[in-house]
Amino acid sequence: MWFSFWRPRDRFTLDELRYLIDQLMKTQVVNDVNKAFVIEALRSIAELITYGDQHDLNFFEFFMEKQVMGEFVRILKISKNVIVSVQLLQTMSIMIQNLKSDHSIYYLFSNEHINFLITYPFDFRNEELLSYYISFLRAISGKLNKNTISLLVKTEKDEIVAFPLYVEAIRFAFHEEGMIRTAVRALTLNIYHVGDMCVNKYITTTPHEDYFLNLVKFFIEHCISLNGLIPPTAESQVPESTSSILSAVDEIEDNLYYLSDVVSAGIPDVGTLITDDMLKLLIFPMLLPSLRIEVSDGKKFSSVTSLYLLCCILRILKIKDLANIVAAALICSVESFLPIFEAKLNGFMADNDDESHVHDEKPSRNLDSSSMIISIPSLSTSSSVQHNCGRSASVLRDALISYITSGDDMQVVGSLSVLATFLQTKELDESMLDALGILPQRKQHKKFLLKALVGEDTGEEQLFASKNCTSKDGSDGELNIYLQRLQDQYEVSCSYQEVGESPHVHRFLVLDALISLFCRASISADALWDGGWLFRQLLPYSETEFNTRHLESLKDAFAKCCNQLVEEQRGSWPDLLIQVLCDEWRKCKRAIEASSPRKEPKSILFPTKKLPSPVDSLIDVIPIESSFAAGETMYERVKVFVLLHQLRIFSAGRSLPDQPPILPLADFPEISRAKSAGLNIIGPKLSTELHLVDAVPCRIAFERGKERHFHFLAVSLGICGWIILAEELPQKPSHGIVRVVAPLAGCNPKIDERHARWLHLRIRPSTLPLTETAKNAANLKLKSKSLVDGRWTLAFKDEASCNSAVTMIHEEIDLQCKEVERRLKPLFSEEI
């Protein structure tokens, strides 16, 4: 038998298939002697059936005639070898994936053979076997449609009572191996997108609906893990934690995108199930209480983590009810959330930080929320909220505002991101945006105009009334509906009074906070730019929304920035100041005029450097006296200056120009050291000849024991300046060849205290590595050697020569800085 099996024969023939099936049917036991044959027979049958499906239908006809599916089941029963089980699952996967004929698929899925394989008690302790089993299930799901899915379910009285493919697959939905979880999610989505009404009903009834509950609880576990990685303050975050945070963020967002795909499948009630679980298990008891300003030891989440999670949930899970209910909750005063943490909440303990598991106990959808009390006070109370981190905000919306006015960088970015997310959420009703104070001006005017056109008195009054008038209608639209749902559907006790203030009041709270933010010197430029985007969205056309106090505040903040920029004109980087300013002007204009925020929500979790001490976060990498630290400061100051300048232009009702008002280059000076040296507008180049007018002889050693003789020269051309070391030409007196060139600005000349003939210079790079220092500071410790300034010590023949060199440096730096000041003068003197 074994000799005949291995003898040469033509493959891909019906005779070959007949022979293999005949030998397989004769097999009564699978042991170490014949397991190699059985495995090879199973593999070859898969190849032949796939070949026949595309070339000769007689192959599959013979396969059906011999009832080979039954033989596969028999082989599985008599085999105790894992390798045979693996090959059988692989054979089935290959056949199902590659068969194109509907007739063939119908046959495979009939006669309950597939369901037998699905429910067979494999030993899943073997990782390879589990992998092939999941691939087998996924292959089946790829062939599902409204016709084939009926072959895999069991029905009684026109209702599905069993669906082994779905039930067995979701057993592994929370497996520790990510590839298995991904495959199960793809399988479930294939089932959901079939759109079979009976199947949809089956998966949304008890106990199968608990899968969606477990998905939310699994998501919460990852949220808790992320929160454990976030440091209590921005200053305490270390670069080593960045990769861990990013991995946790990826896992959280993957879970949310899967939930979004599940909801988008359109299965009735699934969106409601996920919304209810997300609100009751995460948002109400954990996230919203963490937004309260006062510090509480009972908080499960930090405010930064909560802000990030709210942004992600609302941006990815585009569920109308979820977005509107969260928005309604934010205009409520959460008086008692903390007691929820003291009791066990569907598998999560408030006093236990250990990670829980979704299968630790039988899931329950009953949530004791008797202690959740939300009230909406009169807006006259909330409008007078003092935005101070030392006291509690009466409304959660005011907590967000307090973060903007008093929080650190991470809290500012988080709060702005939440407001921006609500503004970008199309599912959110305009009445919610109005109550949050972020309804854009154009939409607000449109709403009042529509009211006036349909004859509502309040609409006409608000359209033409002054900003200080009061409104009679209070909150409208769907706001009241969702406030009532908070009480009725989620057992959250709500009480609210009729709002007696103008809708402008909500808006002024946010605008005042943004103006206050722009005046804060301790917040990074990136965070301020985020505020600039939100500000522009709320006031696309400016005009009357600005009051005198707003304008004065912006003017004072701008004046401080002007003083800082004046300092930079004579700092370490004046030659790059104009280039950086023009680049950041374009970037800022593009950022605040964009249709959506420029950052992803995960940016909330990573702190940015602050002013006025940007060196603090890099103190271990960049010394305080380093030119790189000065460059960081210059870069941040320019970004803040540009933003405030554009806001002032905007506040005046003018459109933003594409370029800042900077004067062009001046003509090449006729009398200068550069001209005398024979330099052109391009500047000095290595190995080129120049006149050694005013050059001072000196000595320097770039390598130990190798001293070289040069002529020292400092020159400037416009906003550029250089230190030149040239070798004198023996055959051509007073002429030399340029050997070394370094930037003039930031050289900080100092005569040695003990040796008056020695001159110390700091040599900075010709360009500022902004991509490393400003955007990738977390990795600087790996590149610290590249962030060290050069140090030169020049030896002159006498003190007079040394002093002459110092005087030359100061004179040329003065000329360089004066040219920068001249070109930037319109930027400061322009009347807005």
Image (spheres, grey):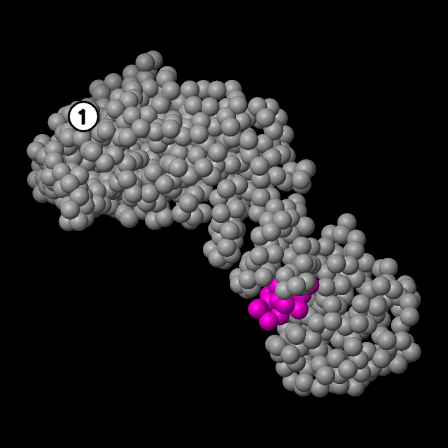
Amino acid type for the residue under numbered disc 1? Ser
Question: At 83% across and 82% down in the image, what residue appears?
Answer: 19
Q: Dividing the image into 4 quarters, which one contains the N terminus?
A: bottom right
As drawn, which residue projects farthest toward the front? 157
Residue in the foreground of this view, choosing between 101 and 406: 101
Mark yes or no: residue 766 visible.
Answer: no
- The percent position of residue 337, horizontal first and vertical second, equals 48, 26
The residue wearing badge 1 is 553
As drawn, which residue projects farthest toward the top? 754
Residue in the foreground of this view, choosing between 303 and 452: 452
Residue in the foreground of this view, choosing between 36 and 765: 36
Residue 334 vertical position relative to residue 137 in the rendered view, above or below: above
Which quadrant of the structure image shows residue 725? top left
383 to the left or right of 265: left
Residue 148 vertical position relative to residue 291 in the rendered view, above or below: below
Which quadrant of the structure image shows residue 428? top left
- The percent position of residue 403, horizontal first and vertical second, equals 35, 27
- The percent position of residue 734, horizontal first and vertical second, equals 20, 37
Residue 93 vertical position relative to residue 532 in the rendered view, above or below: below
Which quadrant of the structure image shows residue 763? top left
- The percent position of residue 663, horizontal first and vertical second, equals 11, 41
Residue in the foreground of this view, choosing between 94 and 110: 110
15 to the left or right of 575: right
Write the start and end of the magenta stretch as one range.
Answer: 139-154
Q: Judge whether residue 153 is colored magenta.
A: yes
Question: At 45% across and 42% down in the image, what residue appears?
Answer: 313
Question: At 86% across and 66% down in the image, what residue appears?
Answer: 35
